[in-house]
Image (cartoon, rainbow, N blue to C red):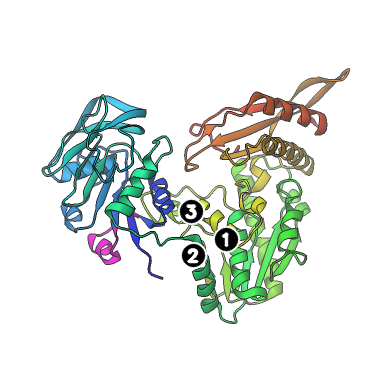
């Protein structure tokens, strides 16, 4: 099915993926491309609208990312956000200058043109997220100012005849209270998109496409039990049944009881028609990791060993026609294939493609989806909610939530502590509102007193963050009583722990994971 398309041109903004996600939430399909994308290619894609992202540069400086004036003369509606707004003004004859005072954070925006299509249904005074050093001191010919702030004379402007709209703030972030409404007004109102991007139709189309592609061929899938690989596996199962073989490698670094939970869903007793192979490789991994403390070395061992185990199982199966991967759209963008993002997606993913598995082609049924869309697709497929909304879990698993050497004893400690933490967060009704949360095992041992005895045991660190895009994150404010209950249970129920700490570090300077 040919979908209506809105293009996001990436000028290096940190929220580029978020812009695309917000557009997709309006049921409009959206893809991210670099600002270096040729104009002819854009014309050939026939988009219904174009959105220019923010970026770290000043548009008037030599060598700054830019685009030709012709982009704004295609007759296709264009929306510029932050840097994109400034660039639009600069290219079309307006003036952009360094501001006397930068605006950063939540700012009250006063709407001057209430009849603007962008501000339809938006409050006259609305809170928006500002982040800029430069400002539009003079709008381009044909434009009129549609909103302002105390420090910014042009918070937005538009040339309705030309279908050009410029917004100085960031409507895509949640801090902009009515930002989603503004983007909806642009893609559904100005661009005239009907909203034909829906997960129910996506699932039906994918099942049909997979059947056509695979025919009577054999398909192999590396199943981690995570959301992406699970949804991919169920899609394939619905399409081709037992032509699909799923290999689940339990490396002993999963969360408590997780291996059994995956088998219960996908194994012979589960509801899906497929061939399920579970490889219990815990001891093999522990031997490989013995004495290894350096984080990157651990990741490398875990990744390489996964590929070796997978290859061994694949050889037993023999030649297959297709290999399934749970690649999703952020993986595509962050691998440098879309937008301007640096290649940043290596350290949490297990392995890469096996070298010695005989297959003709890769199937990536989810490569067009964001994580929230993958979850919606999972619900459409009838996958249990506890699996669909499973907490994000890195490829190397608990290997990067255990500081220093990985041992079976340390794995037991962090599994037990993490299970208690997740249980208490769920009991408090916070499990869907926190972006990511988990327990990690530090390499610190300290003196404690339990009963009448001194102890010398490990410290557990609890981590919980809220994030929009997983590129930046802030520590979540979990109620003290929840943390206190969690601490008490961990110390009383988990052998080998006598301290529990809460990690307040944001990203940056920290990471979301520990190693």
Quadrant for residue 448, please give it.
Answer: top right
Query: Is residue 37 part of the magenta span, yes or no?
Result: yes
Q: Residue at x 46, y 56 (%)?
A: 329
Magenta part of the chain = 33-48
Between label 2 and label 3, give the one nearer the viewer. 2
Is residue 482 depicted above or below 218 in this figure?
above
Mark 1 vs 2, N-terminal side: 2
Query: Regarding mark 1 in the picture, which secondary structure is present there?
Result: helix
Residue 445 drawn above or below residue 332: above
Quadrant where the C terminus sits is: top right
Q: Nearer the viewer, residue 295 or 256?
A: 256
Indicate left or right for 62 with 423 as reference. Answer: left
Proximity of marks 1 and 2: CB atoms separated by less than 8 Å: yes
The numbered mark at residue 202 is 2
Q: Which residue is mark 3?
A: 370
- The spot of residue 210 in percent (x, y) is 53, 73
Give the mark nearer the N terminus: 2 vs 3. Answer: 2
Question: Counting residues from the N terminus, which is met first, the one under dot 3 or under dot 1?
Answer: 3
Residue 351: percent from the left, percent from the top? 59, 56
């Amino acid at each position: 099915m040919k979908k209506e398309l809105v293009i996001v041109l990436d000028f290096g903004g940190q929220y580029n993926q978020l812009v695309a996600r917000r557009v997709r939430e309006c049921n409009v399909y959206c893809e991210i491309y670099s600002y270096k994308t040729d104009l002819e290619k854009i014309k050939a894609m026939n988009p219904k609208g174009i959105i220019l992202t923010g970026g770290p540069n000043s548009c008037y400086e030599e060598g700054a990312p830019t685009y030709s004036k012709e982009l704004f003369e295609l007759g296709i509606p264009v929306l510029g956000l932050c840097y994109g707004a400034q660039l639009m003004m600069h290219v079309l004859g307006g003036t952009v200058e360094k501001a006397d005072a930068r605006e950063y954070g939540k700012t009250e925006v006063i709407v001057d043109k209430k009849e603007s299509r962008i501000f339809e249904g938006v409050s006259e005074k609305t809170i928006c997220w500002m982040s800029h050093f430069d400002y539009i001191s003079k709008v381009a010919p044909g434009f009129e100012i549609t909103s302002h702030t105390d420090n910014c004379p042009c918070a937005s402007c538009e040339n309705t005849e030309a279908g050009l709209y410029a917004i100085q703030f960031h409507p895509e972030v949640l801090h902009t209270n009515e930002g989603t409404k503004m983007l909806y007004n642009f893609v559904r109102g100005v661009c005239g998109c009907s909203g034909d991007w829906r997960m129910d139709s996506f699932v039906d189309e994918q099942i049909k496409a997979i059947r056509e592609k695979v025919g009577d061929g054999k398909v192999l899938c590396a199943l981690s039990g995570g959301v992406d690989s699970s949804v991919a596996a169920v899609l394939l199962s619905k399409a081709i049944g037992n032509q699909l073989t799923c290999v689940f490698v339990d490396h002993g670094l999963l969360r408590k009881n997780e291996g059994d939970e995956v088998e219960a869903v996908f194994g012979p007793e589960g509801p899906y028609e497929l061939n399920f192979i579970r490889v219990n490789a815990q001891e093999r991994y522990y031997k490989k990791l013995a004495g290894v403390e350096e984080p990157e070395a651990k990741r490398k061992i875990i990744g390489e060993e996964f590929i070796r185990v997978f290859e061994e199982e694949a050889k037993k199966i023999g030649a297959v026609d297709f290999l399934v991967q749970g690649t999703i759209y952020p993986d595509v963008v962050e691998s440098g294939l879309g937008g301007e993002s640096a290649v940043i997606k290596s350290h949490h993913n297990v392995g890469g493609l096996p070298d010695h598995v005989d297959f003709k082609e890769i199937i990536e049924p989810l490569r067009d989806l964001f994580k929230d869309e993958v979850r919606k697709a999972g619900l459409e497929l009838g996958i249990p909610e506890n699996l669909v909304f499973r907490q994000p879990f890195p490829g190397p698993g608990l290997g990067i939530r255990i500081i220093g050497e990985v041992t079976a004893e340390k794995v037991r400690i962090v599994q037990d502590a993490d299970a208690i933490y997740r249980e208490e967060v769920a009991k408090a009704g916070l499990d869907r509102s926190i972006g990511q949360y988990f327990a990690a095992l530090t390499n610190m041992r300290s003196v404690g007193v339990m009963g009448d005895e001194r102890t010398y045991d490990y410290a557990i660190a609890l981590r919980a963050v809220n994030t929009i895009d997983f590129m930046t994150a802030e520590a979540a404010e979990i109620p003290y009583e929840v943390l206190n209950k969690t601490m008490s249970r961990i110390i009383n129920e988990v052998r080998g722990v006598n301290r529990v700490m809460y990690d307040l570090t944001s990203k940056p300077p920290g990471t979301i994971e520990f190693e």
